[in-house]
Amino acid sequence: MAGVTAAGRRHRYVGPTELLTAVRPGAEGRVVGSAGDLSAWLAGQGTAEPAEPFTFVVGPEGLLRLAPRRSEHVACAGGADVLGAGEMGFGRAAGLWVVREVSNLSTGYCPHLDSWDAVARALDRAGIGRPAGFTHAVVFRRCVSCREINIVRESDFVCVFCGSDLPAAWNVAA
Ligand SMILES: [Zn+2]
C-alpha cells in the first residue's frame, strides 16, 4: 500500500504488468551502502562511463540499489515498493565519489518530487557526495479523465492523450 511514513513516501509500481511479471527473484539491483560498495559496483560495469546515468531505486528499507543503465526500475527493486527511483551518474571530487546528475525519471514508479528526501538520506548514509536536489526533476501526473500517466513539460498541465486538465498535486498512486 502506498503512503507516507517516517522513512518517506512509498511508491508502488504503476508501469506495464508484463515488466512486473518478468522480475526474477535475486536479480534486483546491487545494494550500495558505502562508497566502497559503489567503487566495487562501478568497477564491475566494464567500460560504462560513471558519469552516464545508471538506474537506481531506494528500497523500502532506505537503501540505494543500482542497476546498469536502461535496466527497468521494477527489476532493480525486485518488484517491491520504493521510496525513490530514477537515474544517477557519478564523478570524483577530492578523491571521493559524488553524484553529478540525479533525476526521478522512472516511468515505472513516477516518483513524487518529495522522494528526493529518501534519495538524499540513502546517499548520505553511504557517504557518497550529492547535489542539494534533483539535477533533473520530472513532474508526473495521472489524468483523472483517461487515467493515463503524463510527464508534465514546461508547466503545461494538459493531458497529452485526451486534452483534459491535469491536477495540481501528484496523484499517480492515488
Ligand atoms: Zn487524459
Image (cartoon, helix red, strand yellow):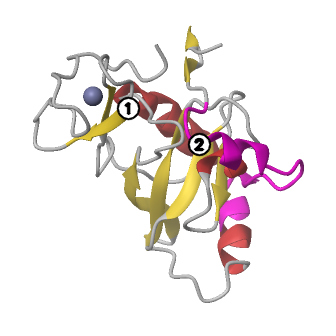
* Magenta residue span: 13-38
At label 1, the amino acid type is Glu
Tell me residue 15's x, y (percent).
Answer: 55, 39
Assess whether residue 135 is covered by the magenta stretch. Answer: no
**116 vs 19, nearest the viewer:** 19
Is 3 on the left-hand or right-hand side of 141? right
Is 167 on the left-hand or right-hand side of 60? left
Characterize the local packing of mark 1: few (<14), some (14-19) or many (20 or more) Cα atoms within 10 angstroms.
Answer: some
| CB at disc 1 and ligand 1 closer than 8 Å | yes
Is 101 on the left-hand or right-hand side of 90? left
Q: Which mark is residue 93?
A: none
Q: Is residue 95 above or below residue 165?
A: below
Q: Is residue 136 above or below residue 43?
A: above
Assess whether residue 36 is covered by the magenta stretch. Answer: yes
**57 vs 157, nearest the viewer:** 157
Q: Which residue is mark 2?
A: 16
Tell me residue 88's x, y (percent).
Answer: 47, 58
- The quarter of the displayed image where residue 42 is located: bottom right
- Quick one: SS at disc 2? loop
Q: Measuring 32% from the left and 41% from the top, which residue is drawn there?
A: 133
The picture quadrant for ligand 1 comes to top left
Characterize the local packing of mark 2: few (<14), some (14-19) or many (20 or more) Cα atoms within 10 angstroms.
Answer: few
**CA distance for labels 1 and 2:** 12 Å
- The quarter of the displayed image where residue 113 is located: top left
Q: Which mark is residue 148?
A: 1
Tell me residue 126's x, y (percent).
Answer: 63, 47
At label 2, the amino acid type is Pro
